[in-house]
Amino acid sequence: MAKITFMGAGSTVFARNVLGDCMSSPVLADSEIALYDIDAKRLKESETILSAINKGFGAKARISSYLGVENRKNALHGADFAVNAIQVGLYDPCTITDFEVPKKYGLRQTIADTIGIGGIMRALRTIPVMKDFARDMEEVCPNVWLLNYTNPMSMLTGFMLRYTNIKTAGLCHSVQACSGNLLKDLGMEDKLEGRRELIAGINHMGWLLEIKDKNGADLYPEIKKRAAAKNAAGKHYDMVRYDYMDKLGFYCTESSEHNAEYNPYYIKSRYPQLIDQFNIPLDEYPRRCIEQAAGWTKQYEEMTSSDVIKHERSGEYASYIMEALITGVPYKIGGNVLNHGGLIENLPSEACVEVPCLVDNYGVSPCYAGRLPVHLAAMNMTHINVHLIAIEAAVTLKKEHIYHAAMLDPLTAAELSIDDIRSMVDELIERHGSWMPKYK
């Protein structure tokens, strides 16, 4: 019987998917499930929903809740697996601050959770908490596997793998959904079955390097043709990534609203018409947060109107990884790991990269991906530079490294002067207050 600890269990919908998947698994159904959070209301809601799902599977799992930092070690004690889905500072106040302050300086964002000044600040709020998690894990469950879903993925996973002794794999939905959604959106559903693909790069900027049908025929020529025609025909939700294919030659794993802010090419004060041209949803993440909060009460009431909630296993990696680690039956994922051994030859060894990985009872074994086309490696390096110096800031607590990280961010550097960047960083640090440690 495995013990699974869910860190940030107040992330109720996500906890429902991952832990519901575990309850539906013959290998994991009788697990001990420990829910941990610092928000009493959300923790209780998760426990209520998960208990109802558990009843639907015969109530085989044992579920317990642990509230607050003082109970964290108990939640983690003896855990075989820990799933991380925390959001330090939540939407209100911290995400609001991450959008409002940069906007004063003329810097606009869409999601702000991965890179950019919003991603940097989120990393600097979250790494100290992850460090505390690691310290507890090293004491009470040193052999645990940590499955990290929290963004900024590369910075948090990179920190855990470089500065703690905890076995960690970073997981994201974007690799799983990439080629399938692309083919569906372009009316190529007949090519889904048996397709072959190679994806490698970094989180949220992994590259679909190859895509072939079940017979080995290259699908890219037809994909590019249809994508160009769709962009020319009118507005749709994925215009930035289709433009990537046109200009860079390859499709990217994460959504267009994310990738619009990952580079200096689309959100430009000198070219405001690009926002409309590429259908870029500025301030998208705050909108989503407000909508999700407004809809949650109704959804919760609907879900808890019955003592039993049905759950169908999702495509989330977590439960399948746990199964593979327990049984030894191999399972392939797109995982975030350190680039040790030159998995991607033309990226640095300390970078956190996203590559195919084989999971079995030996662990998570990343696969060699070779060299990226030079221009794609260069795009990735603009992010890796920020990842590495932001981690350095969190480890050393030197404020100058926060300035450096912001100065190296592609969009920030393209839009703001160095003096404005430094002023913006200072104001963000002041506004975040106790959500961040004190920097020298």
Image (tube, rainbow, N blue to C red):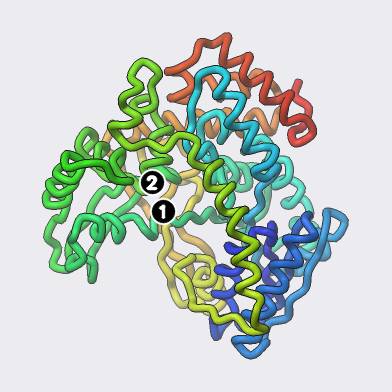
Q: Tell me if 364 is positioned left or right of 246 in this view.
A: right
Q: Tell me if 332 is positioned left or right of 241 in this view.
A: right
The x and y percentages for residue 436 are 74, 33
The x and y percentages for residue 55 are 65, 86
What residue is shown at x 63% (from left), y 84% (from top)?
308
Closer-to-camera residue (283/358): 283
Closer-to-camera residue (309/158): 309
Which quarter of the figure has residue 39?
bottom right
Task: Judge the density around disc 2: few (<14), some (14-19), many (≥20) Cα neighbours within 10 Å.
Answer: some
Task: Judge the density around disc 1: few (<14), some (14-19), many (≥20) Cα neighbours within 10 Å.
Answer: some
Which quarter of the figure has residue 207?
top left
Q: Mark 2 points at which residue?
A: 255
Q: Name the residue under label 1.
A: 174
Closer-to-camera residue (2/183): 183
What residue is shown at x 39% (from left), y 55% (from top)?
175
Q: Do the residues labelled 1 and 2 touch (CB within 8 Å)?
A: yes
Measure the alpha-carbon separation of dots 1 and 2: 8 Å
Closer-to-camera residue (188/125): 188
Looking at numbered disc 1 in the image, what kind of residue is underneath it? Answer: Ser
Looking at marks 1 and 2 on the same chain, the residue that comes earlier in the sequence is marked by 1
Examine the rendered structure and indicate whether residue 296 appears above or below residue 65: above
Examine the rendered structure and indicate whether residue 251 appears above or below residue 194: above
**Most distant residue in the bottom direction:** 58
Looking at numbered disc 2 in the image, what kind of residue is underneath it? Answer: Ser
Q: Tell me if 55 is positioned left or right of 154 in this view.
A: right
What residue is shown at x 63% (from left), y 47% (from top)?
160
State the SS at label 2: loop
